[in-house]
Amino acid sequence: MTVSTEVRNRTAGGIGESPVRPDGTFKVTGQFAYSSDLWMDGMLWGATLRSPHPRARITSIDVGPALKLAGVSAVLTHDDVPGEKVYGLEIADQPVLAFDEVRYQGEPVVIVAADHPETARRAAALVVVDYEVVEPVTDPREAVGHPDWKPVHDEPGERTAMSRDRAPVHPHGNIVRHQRIRFGDPDAVTADVVVQGDYEVGMQDQAFLGPESGLAVPADDGGVDLYVATQWLHVDRRQMSGALALPEEKIRLTLAGVGGAFGAREDLSMQVHACMLALRTGRPVKMVYSREESFFGHVHRHPALMRYEHGADRDGRLVYVRAHILLDGGAYTSSTPAVVGNASTLGVGPYDVPNVGMDCWGVYTNNPPCGAMRGFGAVQAAFGYESQMDKLAAAVGLSPVEIRTLNAVSEGSILPTGQRIDSPAPVAELMHRLDAMPLPGSVDQDIRLLPGGVSNTTHGEGVRRGVGYAVGIKNVGFSEGFDDYSTARVRIELVGDEPSVLVHTAAVEVGQGLVTVQAQIARSELGVERVTVAAADTQVGSGGSTSASRQTYVTGGAVRAGCAAVRSSLFERAAARYGPGEFRLVAGKVESLVDGVVGDIASLLLDGPVEHTVQWRHRPTQPLDEATGRGNAHVQWAFCAHRAVVDVDVELGLIRVVELACVQDVGKAMNPDAVLGQIHGGSAQGLGLAVMEEVQVVDGKLRNPSFTDYLMPTIMDMPPMRVEVLELADPHSPYGLRGVGEPPTISSTPAIVAAVRAASGVDLKRVPIRPEHLVAAALCH
Amino acid sequence: MQLHVNGRLHELALDNRTTLLDALREHLGLTGSKKGCDHGQCGACTVLVDGRRINSCLALAVTLDGVEIRTIEGLSDDGALHPVQQAFLDRDGFQCGYCTPGQICSAVGMLDEFDQGWPSAVTTGGQPAALDAGEVRERMSGNLCRCGAYMNIVPAILDVADAAAGRSSA
Amino acid sequence: MRPFQFVRADDAATAVQTVTANPKAKFLAGGTNLVDLMKLGVERPDLLVDLTRLPFDSVDVEADGTVRIGTNVRNSDLAAHPAVRNGLPLLSQALLAGASGQLRNMATVGGNLLQRTRCVYFQDVTKPCNKRQPGSGCPARQGDHRNLAILGASEACIATHPSDMAVALAALDARVAVSGPDGDRETPLAELHALPGEHPEQETTLRHGELITGIAVPPLAYAERSAYRKVRDRASYAFAVASVAAALDVEDGVVRDVRLAFGAVAPKPWRAHAAEDALRGRPATAASFRAAAEAELAAAEPLRDNAFKVPLITNVVVRTLSDLAGETS
């Protein structure tokens, strides 16, 4: 990778370096305690009875047979929910336990606590629920206005404190949000060259390996302590507070080890259930979902139906984009409003388009609820607009690189929302750099490198090489006027005789390396190498969500601000001790800018520790106008581009991704290893969406809730990568950094599909691609 | 029944239905082996039985008395990391870490299989002289990593193989 | 999982007696399929008889070249055995194409032959399935059948057999050694698995209590010119969408003899006799191979979502045989 790391400091393990993860040794020795590893004497096990129907009225629930089973301590229904019966991230419409009606297959109806997990499961199975099955709404097109459409919800959900201001609530309809973008004169404008296409994205699962789990412990004060794997402790607590009818201070959350998240832990799963059971029984209750249950227990990536029309002049310069994007949100709101916001505002991609007419709908159906998954909204749209850019390139005789560089946004560009890009936007450079990278050599009879890989299906016959390009745009942080902040408590004190820093935030480490980066920031800011990052919990203010590629930016900003406050206090002590002057802290020393080293940081701490807690916000954003989409909705954009090289066995329909090349601007590589990790991981998940991953839902029912039937990439499927990282500082962000986690997920999918199209000649309109899409098409040739 | 785990003998009264994975996690407090799917579809539960890697979620504990079981907790020696553990740490071969104990146990077993001359599906002709990236990928394909740390797992394992063979992998 | 008794068998006769005496008893070998299905509630035995310490764990090559494989030989050991790796490439390749390193270390020969279908309706006890619950119906014809059979199926069942190894053994005319209450017998592998007909619950011709003790692979002069090819939805660690095991004997450009079997397209490892008959004496060309595959597939009954398997398996046949013939199509 190309990283021009500016040497900012001499304190080892600071920003720009890649120190060993502080939790690394625990993770490689099996000692790191994930939420499913927790144990407490006398604890009970929880289990959940879920609806087998995508839609039904509940006519009765008989918990009697379950209660009679030996070892069962509690069997609870919606009647036992102490407080609000519904919860939700943006709009409270999801029942804690179903009442009156179930709206998706897998909706929780009854929870059980027993002395053994098998007993709890058996007890749940003994509960008798009478359902009156209702025909489900499963086609999102039907949901928005087909003559036969039926409402999924009869009553509106309640807005919560987290609701984006412009997230509309339709009291008696299926539309969660309809966002229009009207820029220029999209209705009247015409163009010399017009390309159209319909595109479809299947439902992807986050498929983290560590299923939903946690341990709830009743407390003496009538409250409850919950140890849980989540993405946002405080928003969990806020929703739990309503459902449990407990003040927030009586609900204490501590982060347990998180076995991957990728968006799926942004909504509640077992949090309220475990606490209800613990509070009812007075005993600790552990809940762990099975893999199958996990497929029902969290939201998925929204499936999308998209219709795009691009108009351009004869040179290929975009004149207009008209698009309809329909996102299936499933039964409950979850993050659908934000997904619609992203898909619509980013729906034309990182291109200058003078006229844009975009309509994006998020709708309710009786399919599984969909919500946050890495890159949400942007991932779906990018498959549409990048497919279109290739079509346009072909129509005007340009290469994929030329059409993209010709239309690329740059710093100063005006987006279709009217917002000006006020930081580097090196889209053309990303494409040029990709183009300049050497292409991998052709296959040389090494069957491992051929489609089918080890399947030994080809020795080179029928194999066609293809190359595809794509670039994506992603907003970083929470948009549309949301008050997005993080809190950091920073304390410096002597431990032994050495200065030691303790950083405490509620921000969630999910494997991305946040604890590492927090310590790096503290080292660089305070000149102290001994830094400990405390366990994330609710004993400190909110860190905001580990999502939207925001934690290094926002919690990193909070830690930096906390360190700055601590530093100011230390400088006051330094001035008192050494006389007035300007100081800095480096490698354990106090330096005067005039006199050089004047003393040890340790000596400033003889008077006692220094501690500050700060709240830090990124610059404010604005909501979008509902009718036009105008508004400075985003705080930052991140850009990433991929080139995919594939070999396609056109006779057997097999695809081998030979190489992925990636260029991403990260503003500042705070931890180069972690940046690469995010690029590798995001690219892998984009590859999965391109060629294999789909939660198959038919008539509202999941067909493949297992890892035999829901396939994700193995180490064999992941090709070598070439990665270049640019560091063009964003003047508005801490250290100039840009969010890293989501952008590589966005462009890898369309790049791979473009390469497969180039290799096979098949006009692929849907992801994931399956062998039959290619074999069937090959027959027609 | 008796289970020999990491050099220690445990006397256990187990329900016949108990898998090795559940015996380790719930009866012996060895939670390093992970339950990612419980159906042999992810590899997070991989342990070594008489030196061979298996999915502990599909092995009934009752079938395993008298054999030597080694888990992630038994790989490090008096605090010194096993070379594969050290290589995963050095190469940043993980993110969330949930698959990591299984990856590491699998790699330890796999390296031994290679030393015994076992072929893989990608082995063509005779036994390859040394593990290469293609061999590592195929042989490790029974361990899913959703974070996508695959790119770093391959060189981590090659580091160990090369060190054992007295080579340096630049 | 249902509670069950567990006994370890010390000799085959006792194992057979024990299972014969209890209609709800099952043999347990590697457990990779049975334990999985017990967790799903598909298998609900009262008693498990553990076979793994029985002495059926060797691979022996007899004087006439017959390879005898004990039922307890693990898939990984079998794939690595020199007699298989060098002498029966299609078998070694089929084994190594299956599952993962961990699962191959557990799975045995007998268990592999007797593994149950991956049909989602069979695996889900909340769904009807004629194989699991005779007479309950088969939703697969109208529902999810993308991975299911195009050959040999019936109105009652369109499940596929999931084994890779068995496909290679079918091509090799393997025989199965069986020990039962009435003594020992040997049956051709081709007669081990039954087609579903009206009784998909009867998957094999084994009677309850009969135990597979091993496999005999008779010598095949041209076995070294053989291959197993597998198409699947990802590069490794996935069941087949379609597969072909083939061995080819060509002289002067003419097919003297051929062995051909298909996997993942039928309820049993599908020996392609019609294709073989169509090919003997024909020029070893892609056109002949294609015609042979088409002859076999004339009987195919594809459904809405698995029709692609017809051209797919055809292409795999052409590809595999062309390669063995030393030419490319």
Image (cartoon, grey):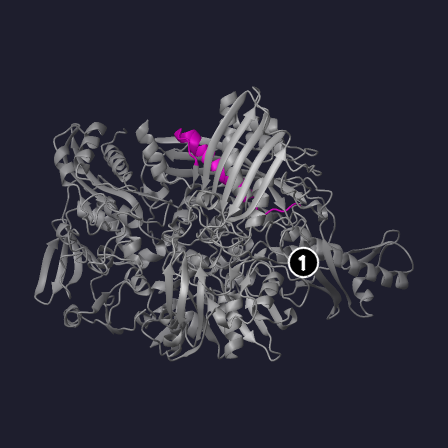
Residue A761 belongs to magenta span:
yes
Residue C223 belongs to magenta span:
no
**Highlighted range, magenta:** A738-765
Which one is nearer the viewer's eye here, A599 or C172?
C172
Residue C213 horizontal/vertical position (percent)? 17, 61
Magenta span: predominant SS is helix
Residue beneath the point at 58% across and 48% down? A338
Q: Is residue A644 above or below residue A522?
A: above
> A729 left or right of C245?
right
| Secondary element at tag 1 | helix
Q: Quadrant of the C terminus of chain C?
A: top left
Q: Residues within 10 Å of mark 1 (few under 14, many from 20)?
A: many
Q: Is residue B153 above or below residue C324?
A: below
Which one is nearer the viewer's eye here, A454 or A56?
A56
Q: Quadrant of residue A291?
A: bottom left
Which one is nearer the viewer's eye here, B33 or A189?
A189
Q: Quadrant of residue A640?
A: top right
Q: Quadrant of the N terminus of chain C?
A: bottom left
Which one is nearer the viewer's eye here, A602 or A303?
A303
Residue C11 horizontal/vertical position (percent)? 17, 70
Q: Which residue is the site of mark 1?
A: A519
Mark 1 belongs to which subunit? Answer: A
Residue A172 horizontal/vertical position (percent)? 52, 52
Residue beneath the point at 36% across and 60% down? B39
Residue A213 horizontal/vertical position (percent)? 49, 65
Name the outermost residue toward the right: A579
Q: Is residue A571 visible?
A: yes
User: Amino acid type of disc 1?
Assistant: Ala
